[in-house]
Amino acid sequence: MWHPSPSSPQASKESKAMHQIELRNITLEYDSVENPVMALKDVSFSVEPAEFLCVVGQSGCGKTTMLNIVAGFLKPTKGTILIGGNTVTGKGLDRGVVFQDFAQLFPWRTAQRNVEFGLEMKGIGKQEREKIAMRFLRLVNLEKFARSYPHELSGGMQQRVAIARALAYNPAVLLMDEPFAALDALTREEMQRFLVDVWKETKKTVIYVTHNVAEAVYLADRVIVFSPHPGTLRAQIKIELSRPRDTLSVEFLEHQKEIVQHIVERK
Amino acid sequence: MRRNNSMRSILGAVISVGLACLIWEAFARSGLFAPALAPSIVLIGSALGRMILSGAMLWHTVYTLYRVLFGFVLASVAGIFIGILMGRFPRVERFFLPLVSVLMPIPSLAWVPVFILWFGLGNAATIALVFYAASFPVIYNTWTGVRSVNRLWIRSAEAMGADEKALFQKVVLPGSLAFVITGLRQAFARAWIAVVGGEMIAATNWGLGWVIFDSKEFLNTDVMMASLAVIGIIGFAFERLIFQTIEQRTVGRWGMVKAIKG
């Protein structure tokens, strides 16, 4: 029987040489007769088990499109995606998704029932569901708000519920599309610290899309820079600073500068 | 807090209805119309009392409620069903949308002669009329509600492994409920118009619409006005006890519509 635990490493059963996520030559073309738009061209990269990968780039560079393809919401024109060594073609419970918009939660469900949704789809019984949901609400420090409806929670709390919801059914991979972009600066910093804690505890493989370079340097093991028209992979930067990271340290700012240069550089 | 609010809303209702009664009384006593045409509140009240005591008002009300609820419930079930299918499946939408667009603007009362020829005088014709009048607002609003379901809810649910059935039950249905309730409200209002109008022409001996129409023959304006008051009170009761309660316990509680303060 499936046995979830936030502290059990997800990728332990995978062989060490295997990438957790692998994109091979992903191309996406929107076929419109007059002017076909190439949203992504020949994008290949991989993510290791328990790695935190951030994807940055100007708007329109295809980073969100790439995430939607990995999530299974969009089908690429060409290329393959492997997760845990298996080719994936659609949506699946091996991936959890968190969006930017607070409205992603179901307003008619309490925080706890939102977190239970994926477990319901897996066919897990009511008592077991409640136990798991409460465990993940505790992980995001919201056990006191289990019975609150989303509209009764602040934006930051709603995003924490969304993270708990995406983790509760125990996917190996967490896909996040600018989850903190709509929050105020102070809450965003708090959420970034909090996300690092949750990631350390759950050992998920994360792809995190953002346009905020400082955020990427703060969170990521590795940052990938996308460039637009068509969306292609321009650079990869490893961030080997110890956590928690000092956002005002020289090394931190140097990484930030390097990434910004990659973003603004002309072809 | 909640008690306080409901006290305030009752007080508000008493004030606005009381004021309307005062204006009516002033109009009745002004001599603009003969007293037989514009009866005073006292006369209307005593006519109402007489009819309640004799049991006649109860039976008229029961007949009218039976017709309106029968047609309304049928229309709601059918309307929600068709509306959801239209919102989910383009083929169903293509088939029903022209029909809805053509039939919805035709006033239900225009069908009365046709329905009398088909169903004869009595319950069947009136219920059919109510069904006709009530189904379109339900279809239309449910269809709109399904189309307005937030795409992120669908995406989130699909990402968590929801199949078509789960998507429908656990996302589309609650997600479009605010619109469905609006549709039911509009449908209920149209159902009342249809039942009273239908009874005036198609009913025999019983029903509030029939009483109003029949009273004209004997210039019983007090009975007319008493029946109108009963219709108003029933409509008010349905709005307060049923529609507002459903709304407050669902979409209001979920923050999907603003709470009613009145």
Image: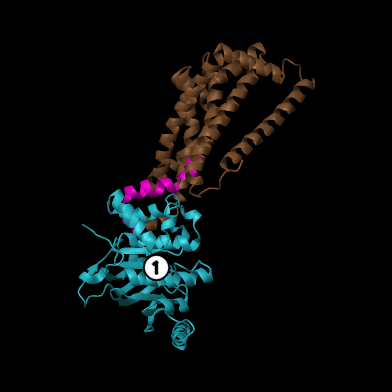
Chain colours: A cyan, B brown
Residue at point 33%, 60% (across, down) = A168
The one of A193 and B105 positioned closer to us in this rendering: A193
Instruction: Indicate the chain on which mark 1 is placed.
Output: A
For residue A74, above or below residue A236: above
> Residue A166 at what x, y percent from top left?
36, 61
Does the magenta-highlighted stretch encompass residue A44?
no
For residue B11, above or below residue A185: above
The one of A233 and B166 positioned closer to us in this rendering: B166
> Residue A108 at what x, y percent from top left?
44, 49
For residue A212, above or below residue B123: below
Does the magenta-highlighted stretch encompass residue B161?
yes
- Majority SS type along the magenta span: helix
Residue at point 29%, 62% (across, down) = A170
Decide if residue A265 is in sight here: no
Answer left or right for B7 relative to B157.
right
Identify the secondary structure beneath mark 1: strand
Q: Residue A46 is drawn in which quadrant?
A: bottom left
Callout 1 amino acid: Met
For residue A40, above or below residue B3: below
Q: Quadrant of the C terminus of chain A?
A: bottom left
Answer left or right for B224 relative to B195.
right
The residue singled out by tag 1 in the image is A176
> Residue B200 at what x, y percent from top left?
56, 19
Q: Give the range drawn in magenta.
A: B158-181
Decide if residue B73 is in sight here: yes
